[in-house]
Amino acid sequence: MSGAEFLNNATLVALGLLTLALFTTVIRIARGPTLPDRVLGLDLLTTIATGYIGVIAVRTGFMLYVDIAIALSLVAFLATVAFARYILVRGAKAREGSEKTEGSGQ
């Protein structure tokens, strides 16, 4: 088996596994019982997309795709941090609201 043939087979296997991961992540996002589960799923989707871009960069030899993958990863990280901050603020407001209703009943 030549090196080019091995690389072709390895990238095909990688694309297949990434596709399987993509489908299971979409199912997790659709069935996720809570908002943090869905945010984690969205973060995983961007990670899988970065993997796709990396594999395509290796298959085509066009290394500009690596820069695109890095930019996507940075944006995904910032989006995850923003979602996490939103969830924390939302949870704090919910706890604050429940404390007020408990306090008024006494």
Image (cartoon, helix red, strand yellow):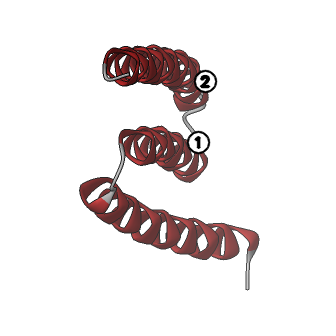
Q: Residues within 10 Å of mark 1 (few under 14, many from 20)?
A: few
Left or right of 100 on screen, residue 66: right
Residue drawn 36% across the image and 61% down it: 28
Q: Secondary structure at mark 1?
A: loop
| SS of the residue under disc 2 | helix
Q: Is residue 5 above or below residue 19?
A: below
Q: CB of mark 1 within 8 Å of CB of mark 2?
A: no
**Residue at image point 58% right, 43% down:** 54
| Image side of residue 21 versus residue 8, left or right | left
- Residue 48, numbered label: none
**In terms of depth relative to the viewer, which is nearer, 2 or 10?**
10
- Quadrant including the N terminus: bottom right
> Type of residue at label 1?
Gly
Task: From the top left corner, tell me how far across and down residue 72 is, in percent.
Answer: 49, 24
Tell me which numbered mark, 1 or 2, is placed earlier along the sequence: 1
Q: Is residue 46 above or below residue 103?
A: below
Please name whichever residue, 6 or 24, is drawn nearer the observer in this view of the structure.
Answer: 24
How many numbered tags mark residues here? 2
Any mark on residue 70, and which?
A: 2
Provide residue 53's location: percent of width, then percent of height: 49, 41
Name the residue: 55% across, 75% down: 13
Horizontal and vertical percent for residue 82? Answer: 48, 14
Type of residue at label 2? Ile
Camera-side residue: 3 or 101?
Answer: 101
Other-residue count near label 2 (Cα within 10 Å), few / some / many at <14 / 14–19 / ≥20: some
- Residue to which mark 1 is pinned: 61
Q: Residue furthest front?
A: 106
Q: Residue at x 56, y 67 (%)?
A: 14
